[in-house]
Image (cartoon, rainbow, N blue to C red):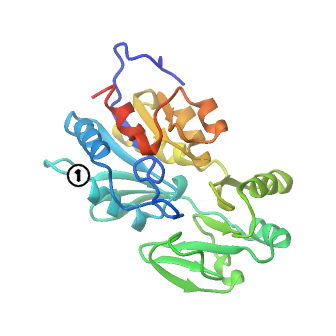
Amino acid sequence: MTVSSTRGSWKPRVVALDIDGTLLKWAEGQSAPVEEIPPAVYEAVNRAYDAGAEIVLASGRAPHGMTRVADLLDLPHGGRDRLWIVASNGSVVLRYPPIDVVHEETFDAREAVYAILDRHPSALVAVEERGIGYRLNDHFPPGELSGDMIVTPVEQLVAQPVSRVIIRDPSSTAEDFVALGRDLGLQGTSYVVGWTAWLDLAPVGVSKASGLSHVVNQLGLEPSDVLAIGDGRNDVEMLTWAGRGVAMGHAPDEVREIADAVTGTVDDDGAAMEICKWF
């Protein structure tokens, strides 16, 4: 938290945006977000972009699940350079279009995965198959993953270093997984729990903040130049790293507590409300 939460003379030069629950909302009764940008959010993001701000999408999604959101926002345009995207919770940084991976972090996930499966033997495990979809030990609930699904034994999934592993147990809860991560320690691995019994494993020190740090370094800017908006536990590092970190109104308590400010919920177009304070 490096700038005042009041407007003053500060203005963001980078706007880092989570996708699910920030740009996109969920339909009633569905676990997957609707792939449609609300008009107020579209207009606010494009107003900031047209004013010269760098728009960076930062999500736990795989790269192929993020480029279509850039397309929905009609970014980039006006002769501007390719968009920066921080994918897979910071493990992959790319430019678009076309997809050009410029930075990637990988790790050996075997020990962590087997420790989790010892506690949750029926858990679903997936690793990204970049540009294609996922390799997984069994199919996830409908709508939770995108792209091609290649069923693969767990021992093959983690035989080589990976950028990210997803663990999902539809019979458990997010609270179960928070306790699981705390109990196991998961040495050598960082983890973040989603809204459901969904656990993302990544290399230690890798987060949306580390991915965004790579971007701002390339732009010759500082974290203090960044406005970041998000709603999930995987946004905590990003929100505390950015010059101004803003939590969506529906975010969990632990996310709202660390933020510089809290905006409206996704149903209230909270991201647009915050962006319109500056552009």
Q: Which residue is mark 1?
A: 76
Relative to 50, residue 147 above or below: below
Q: Is residue 115 left or right of residue 36?
A: right
Location of residue 157 by image quarter: bottom right
Q: Quadrant of the C terminus?
A: top left
Looking at the image, which is closer to me, 224 or 167? 167
Relative to 140, residue 103 above or below: above
Q: Quadrant of the N terminus?
A: top right
Relative to 68, residue 155 above or below: below
Name the residue: 41% across, 32% down. 226
Q: Is residue 144 left or right of residue 183?
A: left
Residue with the most extreme left position: 78
Name the residue: 59% across, 64% down. 164
Secondary structure of the residue carrying tag 1 is: loop
Q: In x, y percent, where is residue 108?
A: 69, 67
Q: Is residue 221 left or right of residue 159?
A: left
Q: In x, y percent, where is residue 145?
A: 51, 71
Location of residue 255 by image quarter: top right
Name the residue: 37% across, 42% down. 218
